[in-house]
Amino acid sequence: MTYENALTELEGIVTKIESGEMEIGQLSTALKRAQELLAFCKNQLTQVENDVNKILNEQE
């Protein structure tokens, strides 16, 4: 999975919830999936931030 794929899937879940397209029975599963996707995206962003900081520190 890539960051972009996770973000697209997360946006799709949010859109369905906001528009009322999601049935109550699906809501719990969708929210759990959204939580997983958020954690994945956060990890990816943290990793990139760490890599950038490492590169910048090496430049000094």
Image (spheres, rainbow, N blue to C red):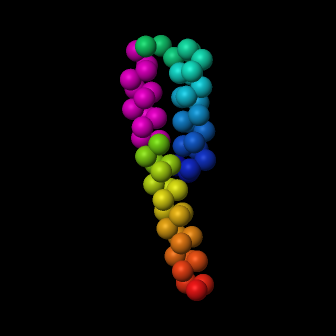
Residue drawn at (48%, 51%) of the image = 42
Q: Position of residue 17 (x, y in %)?
A: 53, 21
Q: Nearer the viewer, residue 36 or 52?
A: 52
**Residue at the outermost front position:** 60
Task: State the residue in front, 29 or 51.
Answer: 51
Taking the image as shown, residue 8 lies to the left or right of residue 28, namely right
Measured along the vertical axis of the image, is residue 59 above or below residue 40? below
For the C terminus, which image quadrant? bottom right
Total number of numbered discs in the rendering: 0
What percent of the width, then of the height, locates residue 25? 40, 15
Secondary structure mainly formed by the magenta segment:
helix
Q: Nearer the viewer, residue 8 or 54?
A: 54
Residue 19 in the image: above or below residue 38: above
Determine which quarter of the picture holds residue 31.
top left
Q: Residues in magenta?
A: 25-37
Name the image quarter holding residue 13.
top right
Q: Nearer the viewer, residue 60 or 32?
A: 60
Image position, residue 39 (x, y; %):
43, 46
Q: Residue furthest bottom?
A: 60
In the depicted structure, whether residue 12 falls above or below residue 20: below
Residue at x 47% of width, y 13% of height: 23
Q: Residue at x 43, y 19 (%)?
A: 26
Residue 4 vs 20, above or below: the answer is below
Snapshot quadrant of residue 48: bottom right
Q: Is residue 28 magenta?
A: yes
On the image, the x and y values in percent for residue 36 come to 42, 41
